[in-house]
Image (cartoon, rainbow, N blue to C red):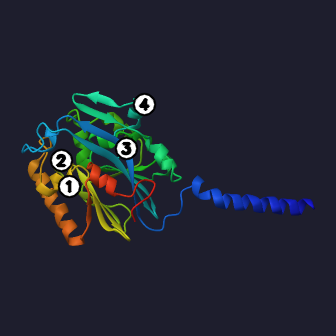
């Protein structure tokens, strides 16, 4: 067999192998918006009183999930919230602090790798708010465009208390930023919209998605922590403004009604479990 024929045969074999391995080595092309729910930690509490100022949870234990959400769009990838932080994964069994147990089972980059992505592939980073359980891995994405609510940043930099760790946000100082103070259409086509929903914090936000099959989906941030908070309009006592919280609840509830949309209460274990298990996605 001639050398040229050998090269053609060998080259053809390589192409065939690449066609088989390709999906495992690189992210597939996205033609429609997808929502992925990633496990970015868990929180177990001995007393859930902090999640309602009218006493329903007083003295009752409970567990919250702490997801991150990846939105893949033909124009780029948006990561919504970044969880408790992968440093917790170094502590087998998690960390106990004043009746609150937190842990992380799987690191965020390892989950992204399952669908062929790395932190460098995240083009946009946005947050429901700047409490530490939503910003833990933020500094792992310095190459993304950080979409930041100005009121939220100003509040976080004012050192508002133990729920904010500004060190987890330090990369914003050198990253490309998009400052916003109202609703924001991330990709300019109405499919991924950040909604201004203040009350829990001054610049709190929720995320509205328009998916081709699932229709309208709203990620709550911490507008609600549990399904019961949504159902009964319960407000945590540590929210910065009760009236703003209730107005934001009314706004989101009306959007859900008008669009026949689906609400995902981000911290609720049942809502998280109802979403497609990663690496599957909702579209």
Among the two numbered marks 3 and 1 on one chain, the one whose residue lies closer to the N terminus: 3
Tell me, for residue 281, which label it has, or none. Answer: none
Q: Secondary structure at mark 3?
A: strand
Q: In the shown orientation, is residue 161 left or right of residue 42?
A: left
Among the two numbered marks 4 and 3 on one chain, the one whose residue lies closer to the N terminus: 3
CB atoms at circles 2 and 1 under 8 Å apart?
yes
- Residue annotated with mark 2: 200
Q: Nearer the viewer, residue 217 or 140?
A: 217
Q: In the shown orientation, is residue 194 left or right of residue 49?
A: right
Q: Residue at x 20, y 36 (%)?
A: 160
- Residue annotated with mark 3: 40
Among the two numbered marks 4 and 2 on one chain, the one whose residue lies closer to the N terminus: 4
Real-space CA distance between mark 1 and mark 4, rounded to the nearest whole angstrom: 34 Å
**Quadrant of the rendered structure where residue 190 is?**
bottom left
CB atoms at circles 3 and 2 under 8 Å apart?
no
Q: Residue at x 22, y 30 (%)?
A: 99
- Residue annotated with mark 1: 197
Q: Nearer the viewer, residue 9 or 158?
A: 9
- Residue annotated with mark 4: 90
Real-space CA distance between mark 4 and mark 3, rounded to the nearest whole angstrom: 14 Å
CB atoms at circles 1 and 4 under 8 Å apart?
no
CB atoms at circles 4 and 2 under 8 Å apart?
no
Q: Position of residue 265 (x, y in %)?
A: 25, 54
Q: Secondary structure at mark 2?
A: loop
Q: Nearer the viewer, residue 210 or 147?
A: 210
Among the two numbered marks 3 and 2 on one chain, the one whose residue lies closer to the N terminus: 3
Real-space CA distance between mark 2 and mark 1, rounded to the nearest whole angstrom: 8 Å
Is residue 259 something one can see in this rendering? Answer: yes
């Amino acid at each position: 067999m001639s050398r040229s024929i050998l090269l053609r045969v060998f080259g053809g074999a390589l192409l065939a192998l690449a066609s088989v391995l390709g999906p495992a080595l690189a992210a597939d092309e996205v033609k429609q918006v997808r929502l992925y729910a990633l496990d970015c930690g868990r929180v177990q509490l001995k007393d859930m009183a902090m999640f309602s100022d009218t006493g329903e949870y007083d003295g009752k234990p409970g567990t919250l999930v702490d997801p991150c959400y990846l939105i893949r769009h033909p124009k780029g990838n948006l990561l919504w919230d970044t969880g408790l932080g992968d440093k917790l994964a170094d502590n087998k069994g998690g960390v106990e602090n004043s009746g609150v147990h937190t842990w992380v089972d799987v690191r965020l980059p390892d989950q992204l790798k399952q669908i062929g992505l790395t932190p460098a592939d995240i083009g946009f980073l946005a947050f429901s708010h700047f409490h530490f359980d939503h910003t833990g891995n933020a500094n792992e994405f310095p190459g993304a465009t950080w979409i930041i609510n100005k009121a939220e940043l100003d509040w976080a930099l004012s050192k508002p208390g133990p729920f904010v760790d500004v060190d987890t946000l330090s990369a914003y100082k050198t990253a490309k930023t998009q400052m916003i103070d109202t609703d924001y259409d991330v990709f300019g086509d109405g499919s991924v919209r950040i909604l201004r929903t203040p009350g829990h914090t001054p610049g709190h936000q929720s995320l509205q998605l328009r998916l081709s099959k699932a229709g309208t989906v709203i990620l709550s941030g911490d507008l609600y922590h549990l399904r019961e908070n949504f159902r009964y309009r319960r407000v945590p006592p540590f929210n910065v403004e009760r009236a703003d919280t209730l107005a934001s609840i009314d706004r989101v509830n009306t959007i859900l009604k008008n669009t026949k949309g689906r609400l995902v209460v981000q911290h609720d274990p049942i809502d998280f479990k109802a979403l497609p298990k990663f690496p599957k996605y909702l579209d």
